[in-house]
């Protein structure tokens, strides 16, 4: 498993800015060290007329694919698992995200936004995350807060991982948490 300090987990309530924080850290790392090899993905909301209708997954180089939607057509919809009103397009997610989670010799950092209920419908996703943790390559990931006091088992495994450092994000601490994560990641990357 990853050495202590190698797994940086950002958590907090929905809408607090976990993805924004992770992308700000990513941009800061790339601008301060453009040669860093960073792999992974992030998710983003799809909005129509001010209403959230789904989510997309993006690679760090800008490729994208559907993750979940309220508008998946009826024949496809019956085969898709659901999270609330959203049908999860597991095949689309896997086709884009899983190649980004392959450990390569030159990888300096993995970004995984997020390890959540939708992503975990992929039976190959969490084993890929565990493989990354075993590789000793640093990971910056977001995880949801436990709902009604109950954690998703895979998320609990990450939260309790011996190499995990957890940052709980709130609207009032976003800038401070970003700086703390950036500083710890730079330190971790220099030790690698």
Image: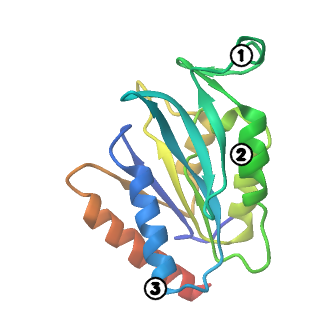
* Residue 101 visible, this orientation: no
From the top left corner, tell me how far across and down residue 89 is, in percent.
70, 31
Quarter of the picture holding the N terminus: bottom right
Question: Residue at point 40% right, 55% down?
Answer: 20
Give residue 126's mark: 2
Rendering quarter of residue 163:
bottom right
Residue placed under numbered mark 3 in the picture: 32
Compared to 37, does 92 lie above or below? above
Compared to 67, does 57 lie above or below? below
The residues bearing labels 1 and 3 have C-alpha atoms spaced at a distance of 44 Å
* Residue 139 visible, this orientation: yes
Please give left or right for residue 178 compared with residue 153 in the image. Answer: left
Question: Residue at point 70% right, 17% down?
Answer: 73
Which residue is nearer to you in this view: 65 or 22?
65
Question: Residue at point 48% right, 39% down?
Answer: 45
From the top left corner, tell me how far across and down residue 48 is, in percent.
44, 29
The residues bearing labels 2 and 1 have C-alpha atoms spaced at a distance of 23 Å
From the top left corner, tell me how far across and down residue 64 is, in percent.
65, 49
Residue placed under numbered mark 1 in the picture: 77
Q: Nearer the viewer, mark 2 or mark 1?
A: 1
- Structural crowding at the residue carrying mark 1, measured as other residues with C-alpha within 10 Å and reported as few (<14), some (14–19) or many (≥20): some
| Residue with the most extreme left position | 172
Q: Nearer the viewer, mark 3 or mark 2?
A: 3
From the top left corner, tell me how far across and down residue 160 is, in percent.
54, 50
Q: Earlier in the sequence, mark 2 or mark 1?
A: 1
Which residue is nearer to you in this view: 190 or 178?
178
Compared to 34, does 39 lie above or below? above
């Amino acid at each position: 498993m990853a050495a202590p300090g190698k797994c940086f987990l950002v958590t907090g309530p929905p809408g607090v800015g976990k993805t924004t924080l992770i992308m700000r850290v990513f941009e800061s790392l790339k601008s301060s060290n453009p040669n860093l090899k960073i792999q992974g993905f992030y998710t983003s909301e799809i909005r129509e007329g001010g209403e959230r209708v789904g989510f997309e997954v993006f690679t760090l180089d800008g490729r994208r694919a559907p993750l979940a939607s309220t508008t998946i057509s009826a024949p496809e919809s019956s085969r898709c698992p659901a999270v609330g009103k959203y049908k999860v397009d597991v095949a689309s997610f896997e086709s884009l995200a899983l190649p980004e989670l392959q450990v390569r010799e030159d990888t300096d950092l993995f970004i995984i936004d997020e390890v959540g209920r939708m992503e975990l419908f992929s039976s190959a996703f969490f084993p890929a995350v565990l493989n990354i943790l075993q590789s000793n390559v640093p990971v910056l990931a977001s995880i949801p807060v436990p709902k009604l006091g109950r954690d998703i088992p895979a998320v609990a495994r990450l939260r309790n991982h011996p190499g995990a450092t957890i940052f709980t994000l709130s609207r009032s601490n976003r800038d401070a948490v970003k700086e703390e994560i950036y500083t710890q990641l730079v330190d971790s990357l220099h030790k690698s």
